[in-house]
Image (spheres, helix red, strand yellow):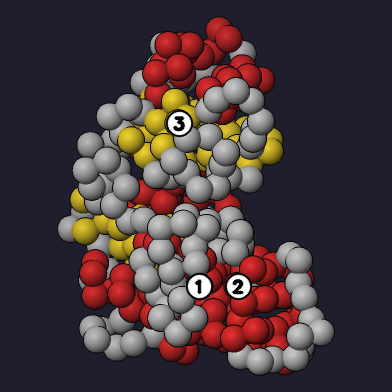
Amino acid sequence: MEKNIAVAIDLGATNVRMALVSKNGKILKKIKEKTSKTGPSGIVIAEQIKRMLYSLTVEKDIPKLSGIGIGSIGPLDLKKGAVINTPNLPFKFIPLVKPLEKEFNLKVALFNDCRAGVWGEKHFGAGKGKENLVFITISTGLGGGAIVNGHLLLGKDGNAGEIGHMIAETKYNFPCRCKKGYGHWEACASGNNLARFFDFWLNKNSVKKNIHFADPKDIFKAAEKGNQTALKFLDEVGRISARAVSNIIVAYNPELITIGGSVALNNPEFILNPIKKYIEHYLINPEIKITPLGDDLILLGAAACVFWPPV
């Protein structure tokens, strides 16, 4: 194994994905597991990653690796090398950098998944040659990452770009699962919240109540079949998302916005089209598209953070 191969980790609320990635962006081997959600503390996540890494490679090859890159759910504390107070896992503190560096004697680059994602987009995807771009993930949760004038924005603790918790709607004042506010974009548009927001929207709009979706996938399936209630709801979600994207444009002035995450990748028609329909025109709008790197973007971004450290 050559020194130009990185271990890339996509730590999500639903799955942990891991791959060996070459410096030219080729994924050599990839595995996936459901994210551990039971145990005495957040250390169980690091233990899961250790076990997966040993299964991905052989012990004699580990010293030859360039390093370990992690694109993780947040919020993060980069000084402590940990995930803290995440709303999507039952652990208040998930240490990652120290236990992994101790175990493998490799440098660990930890970044929020979306910050890693936009770095991967710049080096391997649609952002090649671009100095101002934003990546948005609409998945179990919702977040973003921005590069401005070639610099990856991190913020004090590594949490610049937590756009899922910007206020995107004021008509419904729907409470966010983070318990810190109302009308957050993530509360209205993420996979973890769509079905919950749908029920709330039905009540607020006095729409016929004999319809319920337990899973967001069912909302999109109904819309594909022409269900008018589902279509109206997704149009409203798109209006809210367009307002959030409009805020992002005036905040970062990007030349490109790419969108990924399982909800967007599996339902591009119902995510991308309403955003383009309702987006506001304070500034000249950038190109907005689904990421061409698909669900490998965070893995590729984690690898890019090893090969071209943002800081």
Q: Earlier in the sequence, mark 2 or mark 1?
A: 1
Q: Earlier in the sequence, mark 3 or mark 1?
A: 3
Residue on which disc 3 sits: 93
The correct choice, above or below, for 94 with respect to 75 in the image is above
Whole-Å distance between the Cαs marked 3 and 1? 27 Å
Closer to the camera in the image, 196 or 51: 196
Q: Nearer the viewer, mark 3 or mark 1?
A: 1
Residue 169 seen in the figure: yes
On-image quarter of the C terminus: top left
Residue on which disc 2 sits: 197
Residues at discs 2 and 1 in contact (Cβ within 8 Å): yes
Snapshot quadrant of residue 270: bottom right
Q: Earlier in the sequence, mark 3 or mark 2?
A: 3
Closer to the camera in the image, 21 or 231: 231
Amino acid type, callout 2: Phe
Write the residue at 44% across / 26% down: 95
Q: Residues within 10 Å of mark 1 (few under 14, many from 20)?
A: some
Amino acid type, callout 1: Phe
Q: SS of the residue at dot 2?
A: helix
Closer to the camera in the image, 237 or 252: 237
Residue on which disc 1 sits: 174
> Extreme top residue here?
60
